[in-house]
Amino acid sequence: MYSAATMLFALGASYAAVPLYRAFCAATGYAGTPKTGMGKFEPERLHPVTGARRIKVTFNSATSEALPWTFTPQQKHVWVLPGETSLAFYTAKNTSKEDVIGIATYNVLPDRVAPYFAKVECFCFEEQKLLAGEEVDMPLFFFIDKDILDDPGARNVTDVVLNYTFFKARRNKQGHLEPDAAKDVVDASLGWSHYEHAEPIDSSSDAKGDTAVKPSA
């Protein structure tokens, strides 16, 4: 867990803490997860590079079958310069007769742009509770870091797609909220599905081999 409250105080916005494994992706831009390093939010860096080519950012949305919500972007796309901040909105509505908690995941395409796509404020990975029939606007304050212009593999990109997926939330064995969906579905929403992952260790196994890891005393 971490916070960038001091830096964002100067920007007039809050920066939400995220679980450690998601923080890793945010710090590295792994698998299309927008990078959110502290240095990116220095006020002197948040100035448009006026001589650069504008980048088209398209907003996509989806919801899981288990979530009785509608979820749509209020704008189809925006055009931004590297270093230029932009504010976009999504609208979510709970169409059921019960209160429902949702969690959003996201990814950026192409992957090579993710290290430069910085979100100052957003609703990703946070618990979002909507009352029965409630409709809310969800802000997304972001910018594309000007360092993208120094990356030969990314500086010529002119089209970026931001994908958000909302899932119904459930509590895992540790009591933490997580998407109520199969792992492969969640991985796909995060842009991880085409990456190779190590097989999970079965901690409940009583085998004598080295395949099980048991809690320390």
Image (tube, rainbow, N blue to C red):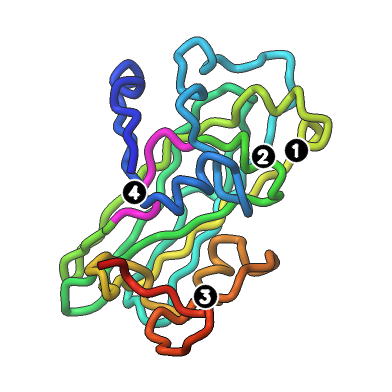
The magenta span reads 119-126
Circle 4 packing at 10 Å, graded few (<14), some (14-19), many (20+), is some
The residues bearing labels 1 and 4 have C-alpha atoms spaced at a distance of: 26 Å
Residue 45 lies in quadrant: top right
N-terminal-most mark, 2 or 1: 2
- Image-based side of 188 in relation to 22, left or right: right
| Percent coordinates x, y for residue 133 in the rendering | 20, 69
The residues bearing labels 3 and 4 have C-alpha atoms spaced at a distance of: 34 Å
N-terminal-most mark, 3 or 4: 4
Select label 3 or label 2 by which is in front. 3
N-terminal-most mark, 1 or 3: 1
Marks 2/4 in contact by CB < 8 Å: the verdict is no
Identify the residue shown where x is 52% and y is 35%. Answer: 118
N-terminal-most mark, 1 or 4: 4
| Percent coordinates x, y for residue 123 in the rendering | 35, 49
The residues bearing labels 3 and 2 have C-alpha atoms spaced at a distance of: 38 Å
- Residue type, mark 3 in image: Pro
N-terminal-most mark, 3 or 2: 2
Circle 3 is placed at which residue position? 200
Q: Is residue 6 above or below residue 139?
A: above
Circle 4 is placed at which residue position? 138
User: Helix, strand, or loop for circle 1?
Assistant: loop
- Residue type, mark 1 in image: Thr
| Percent coordinates x, y for residue 9 in the rendering | 28, 20
Marks 2/1 in contact by CB < 8 Å: the verdict is yes
Circle 1 is placed at which residue position? 158
Q: Nearer the viewer, residue 121 or 55?
A: 121
- Residue type, mark 2 in image: Lys
User: Helix, strand, or loop for circle 4?
Assistant: strand
The prevailing secondary structure element of the residues shown in magenta is loop
Marks 1/3 in contact by CB < 8 Å: the verdict is no
- The numbered dot on residue 56 is 2
